[in-house]
Image (tube, grey):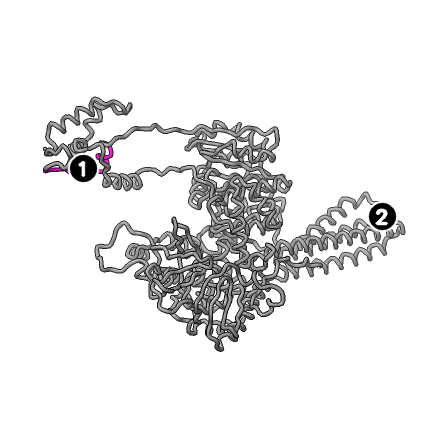
Amino acid sequence: GQDVGALGWLLRLLGQQHQEAAECSELPGHLGRLGGRLSHAGERRWAAGGAGRAGRRASRRTGRRSRAEQRWTMRRSPCSTCRCEQRRRARARGCRQRCEQRRRARARGCRQRRVHVAPFAGAAQPAAYPSHAAKPHAAPGGGQHLFEKKKVADDGHMRADAAAFVPGQGLVTEAKDAEVKSRRASAPEMSAASKRMPTYEKKDWIIAGIRHNVVSIISGDTGCGKSTLIPQLVCDAENLVPDDKVVVCTQPRRVAAITLAEYVAKDRRQELGDEVGYQIRFINKFCESTRLIYATTAIVLRRLHSEPTLDSIGCLIIDEVHERDVYTDFLLLLLKEAMLNGRMPHLKVVLMSATVKAEDFANYFGNVNGQTALKPVKIPGRMFPVEDFYFEDACEWVSFSPPERSGKGKGKKGGRDEGVTEDKIDAVYQAIQKVDTPQVRPGKDRADDYSEKTLKACALWRECEVYIDLVEELVYYFHKSEPKGDGFPIPQMLSSSMEEVVLQSKVIHGGSNSEISSMLTNSMAAPQPKAVDAAVQLLKDMNCLTRAGELTVLGKAVAAIPVQPNVAKFLLIAAAFRCIKPAACVAAFLSIKSPFQQSVNESSDKNKVTGKDYFNKGFCSDHLTNIQAYVEWRRETLRGRGDDFCDEQGLSPETLDMAFMMVQQFVSFMVDAGYDGDDVTGEGDYGEVDPVKKASDADALLKAAMVAGFMPNLCVLYRGQRSPYWYLDSNEEVSAFRGSVNAEYQMGLTDGEEWMVFSDSMKMGRFNSIMDSSLVFSPFVLLFANALMIDEKKNEIRFDKWYAYIQPGPWIKELLYLRSKVIPSFKDAIESRDLSSFPRDLVQRMTDFLRQRPIRLDKIEAVARSIDEEVTGAARKHMSFFEWPEDVGEEEEEQ
C-alpha cells in the first residue's frame, strides 16, 4: 500500500509538470489523472493499515488496473510512434515494478523470519531506535513468529511487554521531517553547571577527534562530566550525526543508564523520554523524536541481530570500557570485524572510561582508524584532597577501646599491668600534640578533638596486636558511610564460560568453529583455545550444535531467549510440556541470583525457622524452594505486606521484584510462540505462579524439563562400600554447596536410582561444588539421555557415558517408545514455530512413565567415551538417539 501511494504521487507530479510541454497534449492529461487515481488508492490503502497479504493483493489489483488504463490511453493516442514508445516504456516499467516488488518481498520475508534475539543473559528484546526512515512490515499472512513480540504502545511504565515498543515507525512526511529538524535546531543549551565541567573546556578537541576518527578514545578522570556531557556534545554538533539517526551511550549497569538519562534530561530542562531517553531490559523510555538514548551494552548486542549494520545509530558511545565485561569485549570485537569489512561506514564509535588504557584501545582499532588517526583525548578531572588518618581516628569513629589487662603477665619478663593511669593518658595527649604529619590537621589542633576513651585506647595500644573487633567495626563503618570505588578488573572473557559467546557468534557472525575461534582470538582479551573448545563440546552435548559444529534448529531457538543457553533450552522444553510458569520462575532466579540473603537483623527467636529451611517443603530441590518463596511473596505482596514478609524470611525484595518482571517476560515470549498450557489464563496473570505440589504431575514435568534442559549437568548418588557420595560422568566427585537444601541430603534408595540435576558448578580448591540442584530419579535420566542402548540378553544398559545392569520388564518398551516420540515432537514444534503442536496425550503418557518407581541401575559406573561416539556402522541401528538437523533457514518466498 505504501509503494502504491508513493508511485501514484510520483505519477501525478509527472503528469502536472509535462502537461504543457508534451508534444502529444492528450497523453499527459491522462497520465496526470491516472497518477491521481493511483495516489488516492494507495493513500487510502496505506491509511487503512494495509500490510501483509491484504496490502500485496491491493497492490496487485491497483497495478493491473493501472496497466489496463495505460493500454487504454495508448490506444487513444493519435501518434503511432508515441504509442509504440509508450508500450515499450510500459513493459519496461511493469518489469521493473515486478522485480522491485519481488525483491522487497524477499527482503521483508528475511527480516521477519530472522529471530529477534538477545545475545546475553540480562539482554532485552530491543525496540528499533527512532529512525525517521523506518517503515512497518507485517509477518507474511499476518502471523506472529517465534519470540517476535506484538507491537504495543509505550506508556513509560515498567511492565513485561515494554521491550516490544517500536517507536518511529510509519511513512515520513515532509511535515514530520520538518518538525523533527525544528526540534533538533531548537534544542536547549547546556546548563551553566555543565559548562563549568572540565569536559566542556575540551569540547572542541573532543568533537574534532570524533569527526576525524572512526573510533575515538576519551580518557577522563572521575568527576570530569564525560558520561553526561560528551553524548550531549555529539547530539548538538552540526553535521556530525544525521537527523534520522540517534546517539546511543551504553552503560554496563541498568541503574547507570536510568540515572544518567534522568540527569541529562533534567539538565536540559526536558521531560525524560522526549529528547533524552533510555532503554534497558523490560523498559523503553523514548519516543520518535528522541535523539540520545542511554542503554545497557546487552541491548546494543541484541540490536545487532535484527540490524547487523546498526543503521539507526549514528554514533555509538561505549562508556566504562575499562570494566572489560564479556558484553563489552564481545561488542568491541563485533564492531571491529564489521568495520574492517566495510559494513558500518556511517557509524562513529567513542570509547570512554576513567581509567582506560588508551594506548591498548588505540592499537586495537589501529587498522580501523588508519595512519592519520588523532590521538586519544585526555580530560583532567576534579581531584579531591587525600587525608591521612591514624589509629586514634579509627577509635574515635567507632568508639573503640582495646580491653584492659590485669594480673600477672605471662611473658618471660613477667610483671603486673598497672592499668591506664592519668599520667599515661596525659602522655598520649602530649604525643599527639607534637605530631604534625597530617598537614591539614596539626597535632595541637586535633589533640582536642579526641575523647577521653580514644586517648585511653591509644594508651592501651600494643604494636604487635591486631584488633579484630576494630577491623570488623571499621568495615561496617566504611560500608555504611563512605563512597564506593572501582578497581581495574580482569577481563571477564578470560574467566567466564564461553558457550554463550560461541553460540551468539554462530548466530551473528556465522562460519565454522575454526573461524569463530579465530575471530575470538582477535578480541582484546583473547580466550584460551581450550575454553572455546570446551564451549563447543558443551553446545554439542546440548544439541545446539551438530557433530560437525554447525548451528542446529534448537541452537537457533535457544539463542532467541536472553538467558544462558541451558536455561533457554529448559524454558523451551518446559513450554512444550505445558508447565511454563514454574519454569519461568526457576529461570528468573537462575538469571539473576538467589532471592535468599543473610539479614543483618537476625531474629531473636532462635527456634523460628526462616529462609530456605522455611520454604523447603520436602522438595529436595533448590529450584522448587525458590518457587515456593516466590509464590508466598506474591501472596503477601497482594495483601500489602511484601516488604515485611521479606524482612521476616530473609528475602531480597529487589531480587524478587526483578524476578516478577522476568517471569512475565518469559511467559509472554512463550505465549507469543503458541503456548496453550492451562496455567496461563490471561495476560494479567503472567507473573502469578501456583505452588508446585510434591509428587504431582507439575512436579514431574518441571523436573523433566530440568533434566532435558540442563543435560549433561547430572551427577549420580552412589553409596558403594563407604559413605554416600555424588559423582559426575567424568568420575569426579562433587557435593552441594553449603547453602543448598541438599547439602545434608542422605540417600534413601539404592545406587543408580537417585540423581541430582544442576544448572552450574564451581571449582573450589580440590572440590567441585554444584550450585542449585534438584533430586530426580533414574526414569528422568534414561528418557532424556542423548544416546541409549539396551542389551536385553545381557541385561546391560549404556546411556551417554554411563554403564549399568538392569532388570528386564515392560518399562523397556515404554522407554524406547517415548524416546522415539518426545524429542522428535519437540523438534517439530520448534520448526513449526508453534509450541502448542506438541501432543498433549504424549505429555500425559510421559508423566505416567516418570512417576513410576525408580528404575534400578546396578553397579553403575562412568566410562571414558560416550556410547554415541563408540558405536559406529550397522550397530547404530540398535541405539536410541536423535540427531538434531542443521539450521539452514527458510527458503525465500517468491511473489
Position of residue 405 in the picture relative to residue 161 (left or right): left
Q: Main secondary structure of the magenta part?
A: loop
Q: CA distance from mark 2 to mark 1?
A: 110 Å
Q: Looking at the picture, which amino acid does disc 1 mark?
A: Pro
Q: Secondary structure at mark 1?
A: loop
Task: Give the position of the N terminus as an image quadrant.
Answer: bottom right
Where is 78 relative to 184, above or below?
A: below
Q: Nearer the viewer, residue 103 or 370?
A: 370
Residue drawn at (76%, 59%), measured in percent from left and top?
A: 64
Q: Looking at the picture, which amino acid does disc 2 mark?
A: Cys
| Residue named by callout 1 | 402
| Residue named by callout 2 | 24
Q: Secondary structure at mark 2?
A: loop
Q: Nearer the viewer, residue 670 or 56?
A: 670
In the image, the segment drawn in magenta is 393-407
Residue drawn at (79%, 52%), measured in percent from left and top?
A: 30
Q: Nearer the viewer, residue 382 or 598?
A: 598
Query: Dot 1: within a 10 Å radius of its alpha carbon, few (fewer than 14), some, or many (20 or more) residues?
Result: some
